[in-house]
Amino acid sequence: MSDVTYLTEEGYEKLKQELADLKGKGRAEIAKQIQKAREMGDLSENAEYDAAKDAQGLLELKIAKLESTIASARVLDASEIDTHKAYILSTVKLKNLKLNKTLSYTLVSEEEADLKRGRISIKSPVGKAILGKEVGDVVDIQVPAGTMHFEILEITRG
């Protein structure tokens, strides 16, 4: 069994919907592509058939991954999150000590990460560095561009 995946109710429902779509519409579309390619004749030299079979394999792999993620999911309630430390579903206000700028991120699972919405994965460099830290802590975060220094200003529920 794989590791537990922590999700919000919204993220969990989104994954379930994506799985249903892949199993329904996705599989039906691939089946049509395979049937169309079969009608073209000799399968041994049929590039369309090979491409459709490859697409089918990738679709089934994605379905299996989603099923595994959903099976190992634990839905979290943000109202139960302790705000003394940065945990998954915490919103953390950080101050970049070099640039003197503040920014805010909500810590989420990899499946729910969306930087445009300020949601970062707990497995990202920033997420790993601030996980378990408290207000007032200064963290050094190793990123591709070098080391960044942040002070944790505030922790709230996501």
Image (tube, helix red, strand yellow):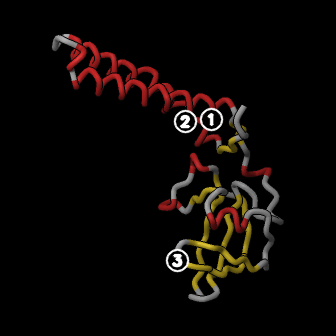
Q: Position of residue 60 (x, y in %)?
A: 47, 25
Mark positioned earlier in the residue sequence (3 or 2) = 2
Relative to 30, is 148 above or below? below
Q: Looking at the image, is mark 1 or mark 2 earlier in the sequence?
A: 2
Task: Tell me the quarter of the picture where residue 72 sits.
Answer: top right
- 63, above or below 156, in the image: above
**Mark 1–mark 3 distance (CA, rounded to whole Å):** 32 Å
Q: How many marks?
A: 3
Work out whether residue 53 or residue 117 is closer to the camera in this orientation and state it: 53
Residue farthest to the front, as pictured: 44
Residue 1 percent coordinates (x, y): 72, 31
Mark 1 lies on residue: 69
Of labels 1 and 2, the one closer to you:
1
Residue at point 69%, 55% (across, down): 89
Give the left or right position of residue 135, taking residue 53 as reference.
Answer: right
Which is more N-terminal, label 3 or label 1? 1
Residue at 82% across, 58% down:
82
Question: What SS does tag 3 mark?
Answer: loop
Q: Residue at x 55, y 27 (%)?
A: 64
Dot 1 falls on a residue whose secondary structure is helix
- The three-letter amino acid code for the residue at tag 2 is Leu
Instruction: Determine whether, in the image, residue 147 is placed left or right of residue 156.
Output: left
Amino acid type of the residue that numbered disc 3 sits on in the rendered structure: Ala
Task: Check whether the beta carbons of the residues at disc 1 and disc 2 lie within 8 A of each other.
Answer: yes
Residue underneath mark 3 = 145
Report, in whole angstroms, how far the alpha carbon at label 1 lies from the one at label 2. 9 Å
Mark toward the viewer: 1 or 3: 3
Query: How would you rate the neighbour count of disc 1 (Cα within 10 Å): few for under 14, some for 14-19, many for 20 or more?
Result: many
- Marking on residue 15: 2
Q: Mark 3 or 2, which is nearer the eye?
A: 3
